Amino acid sequence: MTRGRIERVVTSGLFSLDGEDFEVDNNIWLVGDDREVLVIDAAHDHRPIVEAVAGRNVLGVVCTHGHNDHINVAPALADAVGAPIWLHPADAMLWDAVHPGRAPDEQLGDGQVLRVAGRDLDVMHTPGHSPGGCCLHDAELSTVFSGDTLFRGGPGATGRSFSDFDRIIESIRTRLLPLPPDTVVHTGHGDDTTIGDEAPDLDEWIARGH
């Protein structure tokens, strides 16, 4: 049996907020082994995610935050694989704008531990991009799934409804940058990075304001 299995599925579609639409490619991450997985985010098209699950037991569909491009197929995916949907309650208003007739099944919370395939994923509440944004840290694999909190080259976007630049900087400074420098950052969009690659640029991000 394979331990420490991480897989990426990329789907494409629209991110919609404040009356504007943006074409985006989203990373969906599957974490587990040959028997069971957690799915991190559910973007645009549930079918390739179901294909990647390949019949394994899905313990949960974990939404890093409530923007539509991370949750828009969460109900379809959850129904297809028979799993609960997890979301931090501070993003309920974002969820309700996309899925007014269905609530998430479980609440994510800071310090919570999600266990899959004999490993622990520690939930870190990292507000700023959205009020309920969360990252998932796998200390054993020296990996963090950052959603839209941290990317290669800087923090997630702010300046739109429910976002706050000072808060995302504080989240990154206090929750992510203290992780070991070799920690791989699996992002919600684009390429991976590491904590060590990003940490030296914090002051530059603060100076530029995004």
Image: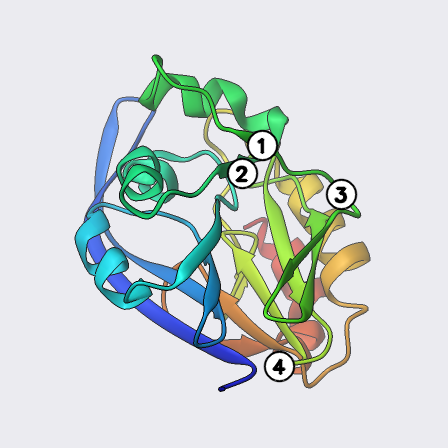
Q: Secondary structure at mark 3?
A: loop
Q: Secondary structure at mark 2?
A: strand
Q: CA distance from mark 3 to mark 2?
A: 13 Å
Going 55% across and 27% down the picture, which residue do you hit? 91
Q: CA distance from mark 3 to mark 4?
A: 25 Å
Mark closer to the observer (3, 4): 3
Mark closer to the observer (3, 2): 2
Comes first in the chain, label 1 or label 4:
1
Residue at mark 1: 106
Mark closer to the observer (4, 2): 2
Q: Secondary structure at mark 1?
A: strand
Q: Secondary structure at mark 4?
A: helix
Q: Are marks 3 and 4 in contact (CB under 8 Å)?
A: no
Residue at mark 2: 86
Residue at mark 3: 110
Comes first in the chain, label 3 or label 4:
3
Q: CA distance from mark 4 to mark 2?
A: 30 Å
Residue at mark 4: 197
Q: Is residue 71 above or below residue 95?
A: below
Going 41% across and 35% down the picture, which residue do you hit? 67
Q: CA distance from mark 1 to mark 2?
A: 5 Å
What crowding class fits label 4: few (fewer than 14 Cα within 10 Å), some (14-19), or many (20 or more)?
A: some
